[in-house]
Image: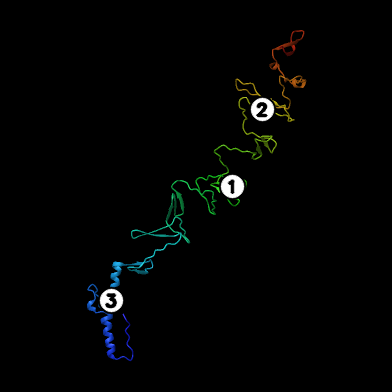
Amino acid sequence: MAVRNIAVTDTLETFRTEFNALCLSDFGDIADLSGSISATTLVGAMNETISIATSTAGFTIRDSSSTTQLIGGGDTLSILGTSNEIEAVVSATDTVTIGLPNAVTVTTSLQSPTLTTGNLVLANGSITDTSGSISFGNENLTTTGTLNAGAITGTSITGSGATHTLGTIEISGNTIRSTDSTTMIINDNLTVNNALVAGVTTINPSGANNITSSTGFTLFGSSIVLDTAKTLIFEGSTADDFETSLTVIDPTADRTISLPNNTGTVITTGSTDAVTESMMANDAIGSNELKTVVTLQILNSSGTPLKTLFGAGA
């Protein structure tokens, strides 16, 4: 279609002729317009045609900001993903699949009420796993807050600072104490490889002296009972291969041996020349202490006993 131009020097007749030709030849006769078009103007007819073409051979896309774009017949709609964020795949027939890649990268933040990956569930400040356990592998776990746990198991637990608390047990340096009591209870056996110091008493299974006291003596607040066939052994003043053992003959009843309230030496059946005259003074040995007692009486002339002497007849 050629461009029609009216020069300023042309006559009115020329203008009339060109104008009629424009309407008849270029625009066309309105009577020839399809009956499906109801518009009576060129612009209206074009808009109505676009609407018909869109509804039959095209469509309009719109985003969350209400921005629209008309996609007509012959146009191409491109759906582009972003590396490590979203993937778009076109497949037959007339299918576009939009999904996430195996590795997703979020440059700012990801918000979700609940996030599930495998058996792991993150929801509202909690991390749980349907398997019943969560493993961090060989990675360090650091927190500046408080760690609350029903049970903590590990080869070592290390924290920063001088004082650490597990429940009501406080560990500060090499000191362990209870924060709510003056007594710590250990329900299982306790093995100490080196010396155990309790007050003034030191128990050292591997030492030369197993039980010692800084006071120089050990005070027992209850009776001491030795198990069967056990012996008290005294080293003496010299640490050598000779000791004195104190033992008892198997008793057939409860027996009591009382030591006298004085200072001296204990005499045994193996003692020789150990009994002196001073030991027998003041009736220290009576007839009851002699075995197979024999009696010698000294009588006066009238037969009255003046002195009775006792001796061991055996």
- Outermost residue toward the front? 2
Instruction: List the residue tagged with mark 3.
Output: 44
Does residue 219 lie above or below 177 as drawn? above
Residue 212, position as x, y percentages in the image: 68, 36
Near-viewer residue (60 or 225):
60
Q: Earlier in the sequence, mark 3 or mark 2?
A: 3
Mark 1 or mark 2, whichever is nearer to me = 1
Verify CB contact (< 8 Å) between mark 1 and mark 2. no
- Badge 2 density bin: few <14, some 14–19, many ≥20, Cα 10 Å: few
Residue 268 image-quadrant placement: top right
Residue displayed at 28% across by 85% down:
19
| Label 1 secondary element | strand
Residue 87, position as x, y percentages in the image: 42, 59
Q: Using the numbered discs, state the Cα–Cα distance from disc 3 to disc 2 in whole angstroms.
A: 125 Å
Residue 232 visible in image: yes
| Label 3 secondary element | helix
Name the disc covering residue 171, or none: 1
Q: Earlier in the sequence, mark 3 or mark 1?
A: 3
Does residue 111 lie above or below 34 as drawn? above
Instruction: List the residue tagged with mark 2.
Output: 232
Residue 35 image-quadrant placement: bottom left
Residue displayed at 66% across by 27% down:
232
Mark 2 is on which residue type?
Answer: Leu
Residue 222 image-quadrant placement: top right
The C terminus lies in which quarter of the figure? top right
Q: Does residue 123 appear to the left or right of 177 in the view shown? A: left
